[in-house]
Image: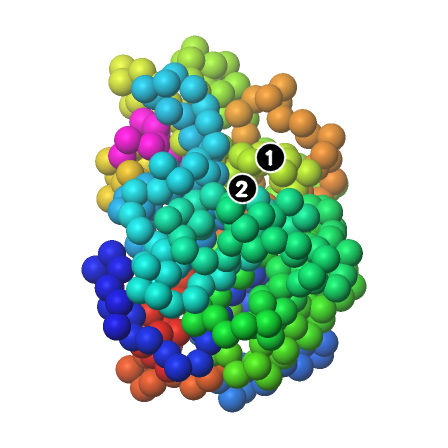
Amino acid sequence: MVTVNGRNYNYQSAPVVGICMDGTSMNYYEAAASVMPNLQRFIKTGSVGLVHSVIPSFTNPNNMAIVTGTTPDKNGICGNYWYNRKLDKEVMMNEPSDLLVPTILSTFGEQGKKVAVVTAKDKLRKMLSKNLNGVCFSAEFADKATLEENGIENVTTSLMEDEQPGIYDPDISVYVIEAGVRLLKREKFDLLYLTTTDYVQHKYPPGSEEANNFLSDIDYWLGELDRLGAIIGVTADHGMQGKTNPDGSPKVLFIETILQELGQISSRVILPITDPYVVHHGALGGYGTVYLEQKNIKKAKEILSTFEGIELVLTNEEAAARFNLPVDKIGELVLLSDKHTAIGRSREWHDLDKVKVGLRSHGSLHTSIIPMIFNRKLKADYQQKLDSGNARNFDLFDFLFNGI
């Protein structure tokens, strides 16, 4: 048994594989049921339920919650992007120093267990590999992996048989799951964490030909993992929703512009969905945090609360308490949008040409209910926990190591 961040994890004799299917809500699997026989078998003979993500329902906060078993106020990761008040600078939240607690991955490695991590986007790799004695590489830069940096070399020539896809190729996520299979075939790992990217989900709705073809390819490799005897748990970091007007154009509220025009209030809006991959979403999501002077907080909250499309306007203290967020990494206000509205800064700040039709995004409560699926039956008490609707995606490794 190993203890990580106050939680105990019992060792398993079979390899344990935790999978984060980025942006994949249950309706994707339901619409693709006919082309996902392996996942359907997991659902019928294993265990399935719906769980909650952390808020904001973005990639970095949820992946780091999953691998630490903790909420953002504990692990420090509450976005992909943030405003560092001390430096007076907006920066990515992807440095190892941003992560405040050890991961389950690094702790298992310290105990002599063999650990491997494959991520689609390299933005996650540095945090996932913090203090990790094991393998950790991104599909994005698989061709650049070295023994010193990644614990593995010659990924594209000696491990993988397929050509390395580009970051905006749907196959890059398939490549991640395939890499897990090939690693497990090559040597016995005790723990693998595989995390994909959500380009497909940003671009294509559930049931579309593109989404179903993608999930069919994923399903093949899930079956291969199962045949290797792995204990598999599949969850997500968030779901996905359309954020459009009736004509298909982006439905966006530009908060900095609204506050300036209606209240003569100068503000800085941080959109923690922001990352280097703007083709996905144009930095538009369902969550934002507003930095402004103390004297303007009440007036700004009153103005924003009147807008259709804004579902919650919370103070720093309210948001931190409700969503377990670090108070020093969010602004004076936190905003969550409704199901079909995105939060922006100003029209000029965003490159709207990349998302001018069919914007799909995430971040709010409406993309926080996601599946958790296991290829084996859970113990009765863990099945009850899953059925309760109160489990979280960061309970994944608790279920995998203690519930099966």
Q: Nearer the viewer, mark 1 or mark 2?
A: 2
- Residue contact between numbered discs 1 and 2, judged by CB atoms under 8 Å: yes
The residue sitting at the left extreme is 6
Question: Which residue, given by chain and number where applicable, does mark 2 sit on?
Answer: 123
Queried whether the magenta region covers residue 329, the answer comes back as yes
Count of numbered circles in the view = 2
Q: Nearer the viewer, residue 263 or 330?
A: 330
Quadrant containing the C terminus is: bottom left
Q: Give the left or right position of residue 51, taking residue 242 as reference.
A: left
Q: For residue 198, say whether it is visible.
A: no
The residue sitting at the bottom extreme is 45
Give the image location of residue 375, x and y in percent: 50, 81
Q: Which residue is painted at 53% across and 25% down in the image? A: 345
Residue 364 against residue 17 in the figure, above or below:
above
Give the image location of residue 123, x and y in percent: 53, 42
Q: Which residue is painted at 21% across and 60% down in the image? A: 6
Residue type, mark 2 in image: Lys
Q: Nearer the viewer, residue 148 or 223?
A: 148
The stretch of residues the image draws in magenta is 327-337
Residue type, mark 1 in image: Pro
Q: Give the left or right position of residue 105, taking residue 204 as reference.
A: left
Give the image location of residue 17, x and y in percent: 48, 70
Residue 388 against residue 331 in the figure, above or below:
below
Queried whether the magenta region covers residue 401, the answer comes back as no
**Label 2 neighbour load within 10 Å: few <14, some 14-19, many 20+:** many
Question: Which residue, given by chain and number where applicable, does mark 1 sit on?
Answer: 276
Q: Under tag 1, what secondary structure? A: loop
Give the image location of residue 69, x and y in percent: 33, 58
Q: Under tag 2, what secondary structure? A: helix
Q: Earlier in the sequence, mark 1 or mark 2?
A: 2
**Label 1 neighbour load within 10 Å: few <14, some 14-19, many 20+:** few
Residue 8 against residue 78 in the figure, above or below:
below
